[in-house]
Image: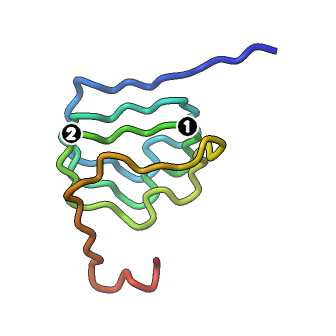
Amino acid sequence: SSSSSFVLNLLGNVINEIPSYAFQNTVANLLMLNDMGIERIKDDAFNGLSFERLELGGNNIQEISVNAFRDSNPDLSNGLECRHFEGWEVTLAEGTANEV
């Protein structure tokens, strides 16, 4: 049996928002979304994405939906870690507390 890896590198692009279902039916060992000017991540942005590692560093994320990762499939075999989150502050918008 052979193993393959897939890296989706979108570096060099500038987008301010990741819309819903942007990565539907995508399988990526590494999804690199660093330094892209991302400010907002919508509901279900990563819905249908299977991934081992997701990089979002160097963006100015102001808003991320509590449902951004709904129905995504992270590979938890090596443990799930969130790194480089210093200085993040989480504020729930009015009406969202029941969704969490």
Question: The residue under label 1 is which amino acid type?
Answer: Glu
Most foreground residue, 25 or 56: 56
Q: Read off the residue under disc 1.
A: 52
Numbered disc 2: secondary structure: loop
Return the disc, 1 or 2, that comes first in the chain's sequence. 1
In three-dimensional space, the C-alpha distance between marks 1 and 2, rounded to whole angstroms, equals 20 Å
Most foreground residue, 77 or 49: 77
Quadrant position of the N terminus in the picture: top right
**Numbered mark located on residue 58 in the image:** 2
Which residue occupies the extreme right position in the image?
Answer: 1
For label 2, the crowd category at 10 Å Cα-Cα, with few meaning under 14, some 14 to 19 and many 20 or more, is few
Residue 12 falls left or right of residue 80: left
Q: On the image, which quarter does residue 32 sit in?
A: top left
Most foreground residue, 1 or 69: 1
For label 1, the crowd category at 10 Å Cα-Cα, with few meaning under 14, some 14 to 19 and many 20 or more, is some
Q: Position of residue 55 (x, y in %)?
A: 37, 38
Residue 41, placed above or below residue 75: below
Question: The residue under label 2 is which amino acid type?
Answer: Gly
**Numbered mark located on residue 75 in the image:** none
Residue at 29% in and 77% down: 92
